[in-house]
Image: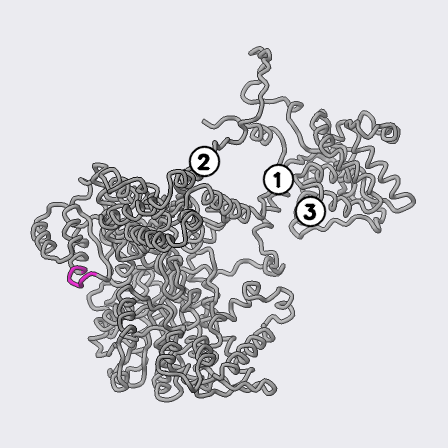
Amino acid sequence: MALPRLTGALRSFSNVSKQEDYSEESADITDKRSKLQEQLCNSDLTWKKIVTFIDENTLKEQQQSVHGDLRTLFHAAKQIVGSENGEEAIESGATFLFKMLYAKDCIGRDETQAIKQVFGPFPSSSATAACDAASRIVSYFTEEQLATLLQSSEELNSDPKLSFGRNIAFSFDMHDLDNFEELLLNGEMDDQKVISLDYEKIFNNQFEHYPNNCGETSDARSFGKIDDTFLWCEVGKYLNDSLQGNTPGPTMEHLCCTLYEMLASHKSGDELQNELFELLGPEGFELIEKLLQNRIDIVERSFSGPNDYRLQSLQEQCRKFTGENSKPNYGCQVTIQSEQEKQLMKLYRREEKRNARREKRTGDEGEILVDAGISFDPKELRMQREQALLNARTMPVLGRQRDMEFDKIHYPHVYDSQAEARKTSAFIGGSKMLLPEAIERENNKMYEEVKIPHSEAMPMGLVEKPVYIKDLDEIGQLAFKGMKRLNRIQSIVFETAYNTNENMLICAPTGAGKTNIAMLTVLHEIRQHVQQGVIKKDEFKIVYVAPMKALAAEMTNYFSKRLEPLGIMVKELTGDMQLSKSEILRTQMLVTTPEKWDVVTRKSVGDVALSQLVKLLILDEVHLLHEDRGPVLESLVARTLRQVESTQSMIRILGLSATLPNYLDVATFLHVNPYIGLFYFDGRFRPVPLGQTFIGIKTTNKVQQLINMDEVCYENVLKQVTAGHQVMVFVHARNATVRTAMGLREKAKNNGHICYFLPTQGPDYGQSEKQVQKSRNKQLREMFPDGFSIHHAGMLRQDRSLVENLFSRGYIKVLVCTATLAWGVNLPAHAVIIKGTQIYAAKRGSFVDLGILDVMQIFGRAGRPQFDKFGEGVIITTHDKLSHYLTLLTQQNPIESQFLESLADHLNAEIALGTVTNVEEAVKWISYTYLYVRMRANPLVYGISHKAYQMDPSLEKHREQLVIEVGRKLDKARMIRFEERTGFFSSTDLGRIASHYYIKYNTIETFNELFDAHKTEGDILAIVSKAEEFEQIKVRMFHTSFFKKNLLL
């Protein structure tokens, strides 16, 4: 039960408004969290402290051997914790092992149990090595030195943490209780006892008794004695002194109200001093000094006055509204009102006139008679004013007024429920964001959980009719053989996709059937080239751009199977699958990756004929625009659109994407007519509705983080398995699959829950078990009888196929796998859990956040269409990343362009191709990119000030500046020749080589710096190894030993 609070009582029985949200709240929270993490690091024993202590307390001749033992301990911790968990987690694990094992001679049962409880199953040899290393390290120090190291952290941790309010002294004076008869019933309260913090009401109540004696009192009052009339009289003196002989200024009542609100605010003295000076001017120095010195007394005194009188100042307001105060107020204080405030005041005046007419209290010309005793509710007006301010906070600061005057444009094929959901907000992980309605939140010491329930299916519209395959023409029936009808999304899209040549953008959830929409456009293109019942296969080419090689192989198999009855040849063209020219000529549909198609279309001879035959370009996963590979897609689309304009030949573009927040921008980029070709389907159209759960682990200690993640993961797995569902747990390293699966199995056995995980004893179970026992994979054989298994790309193909088969038949309840399973095989489960979001990026040499594309693909595996009414996706991450994934998966962040990062490479490619020959053409070329669309929509993100955008709405000058800067860089790298005076570009051999072989600008720059005529073969190899393209190659341990051996020879 929550205890009553003083602040709650004040809010309930007064008209104190809720304090405005502090605009820098997120920054404050982040700052406090970082300080807390620093404090925790300083207060506990860390690996850095151990190393520093050893360096300071050992002799130089001992340091080499001690550091060798430290390396042994660190390597053992790496084996136990897992290299996929990052260096911080390994250091925390090494510290944990040192604290536990420094006084032990060997690993006993208690130590084994403690390590297993924290890290799960571990290699015993690593624990033994860690114990031996810790014992050797300790042997170099005396007991006193060791005690100093260990006690320093214990003392810091043992400081008692006093809770807020422990030192407040309470007075327990007893008072007589009121008689029962005198108590108020049903929560009623006398109006006179309601606390009011409205200064206007306070001073009017008090000064009715003495309106004319202020001057005398003020002069006689000593500076140290403050009574209820102090502010009123001091303001009167100020107005008499400052406005002698001048035109009238602000009224005394208004100035008192304003000053009181400023004094009662939470601003510091310095801030208040500046604001008071701006309000009162240099004549008010003396008044400012008095107000600041007596600020607390003035505010406190105002609580003691009676509150049962009418507000006299409202009469002044009414006179102002009805025009009685007709004197000109030149040089007076100006109040700036927004358009909404003006409308609010008009509404108020209109309402007052209506009430006055109803009670026959209006004059001949409809003016409100002030003497008739008008009353209105100031609280209601205050509430309306606050609501207007709240609404204004959600509107763009730099928004144009004319945008707000028109009704929102409605697009016929956009089904976006997020428009309503954006009206609710929540604070998640310190970030303000918009979340759908009916969310569930749980916040405890271990984690914060946000659960977004699955959405109900969109009700069928009156005009929606399913499209049956039997109603299609002969070509459509052959391609969709075996299907009865198209699903709901495909039926809505059918007319535009199958019977028109419009560019299209399809935004729909994973698993909604976007591939069949691509098939509809393919069939439309084939029908365009049918003459007298014969398909003219030499007249067209169709290109399908898939984001990954695995997906390209899957799409090739799908389209080959569907188009085989029509005699259409489908081939894969990727880095792994090269095609000869004759094969390309015989192929009508190419499935490729963005980089490969970019290389093909960059060449000015040979492959140009191929690109000119392309009639349909299908771009899958267009939401990759905001990732590192996005610029390649932008370059492809820009090149295609310019080819359409220059050759006047039609190339249809189809974009397939997951749900995007700024789908209109992407549609503009693809030259899609939003009224015809834009189709947006939210989560309500998913075949199996998806419920999403986001869990953020709060602890900052890396070892504790791993423990908590495993605990939360087990809780979620158990919840699903006890409900009779299968679960897939996704981790981000191959060795982590075994560790996680063994850990979950161990927890289930220890807690007595293993009975829920055992496979059902079906008729084929015995045969399946025999197949598993034949496998060479030891972990597979051990875990299968308990209902657990693993799956990753490092396993043998036959083992992977066996696991997939057993999981689809229900014999495996929990499958721990890597993301390759989500991409390669369509193997759905009722629930999917992503454990951890840190993945090692070899390109950057560090751990990075799991990409949104992978998360969406994994979540797309949740829910089996034949069996489940809904699926569940759970993502377990750290608390600081919780808001990041919430914004991504609830489409909060708009898709931005990354084209500026690789502008040099793509401009060089266009110059080498010959499509850009001068600055003017390059400026025009940029206008076809997604970068140009987003620069105009969100200029500040791209370094363009609002003033510059107003001066140059088409961003002509900014684009020209970008081109000139990049041209200078390319000219310096000798990739092009740039004549800045005339603005002409010409390509060089080096630039053409870089374009044709996809060598990046940074690599060419490195080669230019390091190459000269006197380099040996070894030097050349060393220079080539510094190329940016080779940064992602990982060096394994056996590679190092091999190189050392060969270098020594």
Tell me the chief SS of the magenta region.
helix
> How far from the left and from the top, in percent, is residue 943?
57, 66
Badge nearest the viewer, 3 or 2: 2
Q: CA distance from mark 2 to mark 1?
A: 53 Å
N-terminal-most mark, 3 or 1: 3
Residue 797 belongs to the span the image colors magenta? yes
The magenta region covers 795-800
Q: Residue at x 40, y 81 (%)?
A: 650
Question: Residue 113, image x and y in percent?
Answer: 25, 40
Q: Is residue 605 magenta?
A: no
Percent x, y of residue 218: 85, 30
Q: State which quarter of the image contains the C terminus.
A: bottom left
Mark 2 surroundings within 10 Å by alpha-carbon count, few (fewer than 14), some (14 through 19), many (20 or more) = few
For residue 155, which numbered disc appears in the image?
2
Tell me the distance, in whole angstroms, between the alpha carbons under discs 3 and 2.
67 Å
Q: Position of residue 353 (x, y in %)?
A: 71, 41
Residue at 40% x, 87% y is: 604
* Between discs 3 and 2, the one toward the N terminus: 2
Q: Nearer the viewer, residue 576 or 200?
A: 576
Residue that lies at the very extreme toward the right in this rendered image: 245
Q: Secondary structure at mark 1?
A: helix
Give the label on residue 346, or none. 3
Residue under the point 18% across and 47% down = 787
For numbered disc 2, what is the local secondary structure? Answer: helix
Earlier sequence position, callout 2 versus callout 1: 2
- The span from disc 3 to disc 1 (Cα, nearest Å) is 16 Å
The reply, left or right, for residue 999 in relation to residue 7 is left
| Element type at mark 3 | helix
Determine which residue is flagged by label 1.
Answer: 383
Q: Amino acid at mark 2?
A: Glu
Q: Nearer the viewer, mark 3 or mark 1?
A: 1
Q: Is residue 115 visible?
A: yes
